[in-house]
Image (spheres, grey):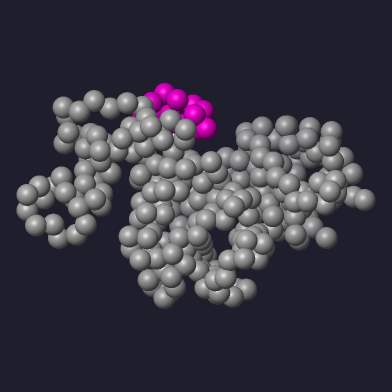
Amino acid sequence: MTTRIGIDAGGTLTKVAYWNDENIMSFKSFLSSDFQSVKEWVESKHSSSSICLTGGRAEQLKKILLSKEDLPYVVEFDATMNGVMHQMKQEIINSSSAIIANIGTGTSIHIMHDNSHARIGGTGVGGGTLLGLGMALTGLTDYKEMIQLSLNGNRSAIDVLVSDIYKDNKLPITGSLTASNFGGVSLKNEETRTKADLIAGIQGIIGEVVATLCIQAADAHGVEDIIYIGSTLEDNILLQEIIESYTILKKKNPIFLEKHGYSGAIGALLENN
């Protein structure tokens, strides 16, 4: 039996969803800077497979997979939404209307009503921000090292909170809210900062910017659920915590799917009949 594969070639990561020998959906990822490894994996493990592509770098990958010239392609947003809906059914998540934030290299924001969806906005803040700013501020180059290190970081030396500004005055809003991301670097000169603190501060920017935009979108469209997906959330405990706490604080319901970064690949796989 020919194996079916769905591949989402993104700006930073290439995600793969496929049926294994036990007919169970399985997953794998590669750096998008190393399409040769994708080619070698396909040729060594799945040379007779049927492949369907999606993602912004799909055409580039298609040229590398020379023996797969007529590969079908699914529009990225459609593949992602199909993958989200499949996961919601599998995880028994009941939500007929929701905001969906796909946090990849940047972030794309969608509105979903039943089986229809539309892109309503986005931001350049995402995993590329974490990697780029992390490299610039700390000299680290390994993405996984960054997200693990951030768990030991302390944002109090990096950010300025509302309570820092108002001191002994009556607080107009919750004191634990961030008044200025990275504002503490200039206002708290006496404090020392570690690489972990800096990376945690970057995670704070990403989480709060994405959550804020999604909350505003949810208010505008009259929905309560916000589904957060995307490869930037994979194994990224701190970012998930930041997004979750801020979303709950603003009285919305955050939902995280189990396979955060594979919705596009899953959607491409399901289209690959």
Residue beneath the point at 89% across and 44% down = 48
In this view, the residue farthest toward the right is 1
Is residue 49 found left or right of 153 in the rendered image? Answer: right
Residue 120 is at least partly visible in this image: no
Residue beneath the point at 55% across and 44% down = 234
| Front one among 100 and 174 | 174
What residue range appears in magenta?
Answer: 133-146
From what the image shows, is residue 144 above or below residue 240? above
Viewport quadrant of the C terminus: bottom right
Is residue 1 found left or right of 65 in the rendered image? Answer: right
| Front one among 261 and 95 | 95
Residue 102: x and y in percent read: 53, 55
Is residue 135 within the magenta segment?
yes
Residue beneath the point at 66% across and 45% down = 15
Is residue 108 found left or right of 268 in the rendered image? Answer: left
Residue 41 is at least partly visible in this image: yes
Residue beneath the point at 67% across and 49% down = 8
Residue 67: x and y in percent read: 86, 41
Is residue 60 within the magenta segment?
no
Residue 23: x and y in percent read: 82, 52
Which secondary structure class fits the magenta region best? helix
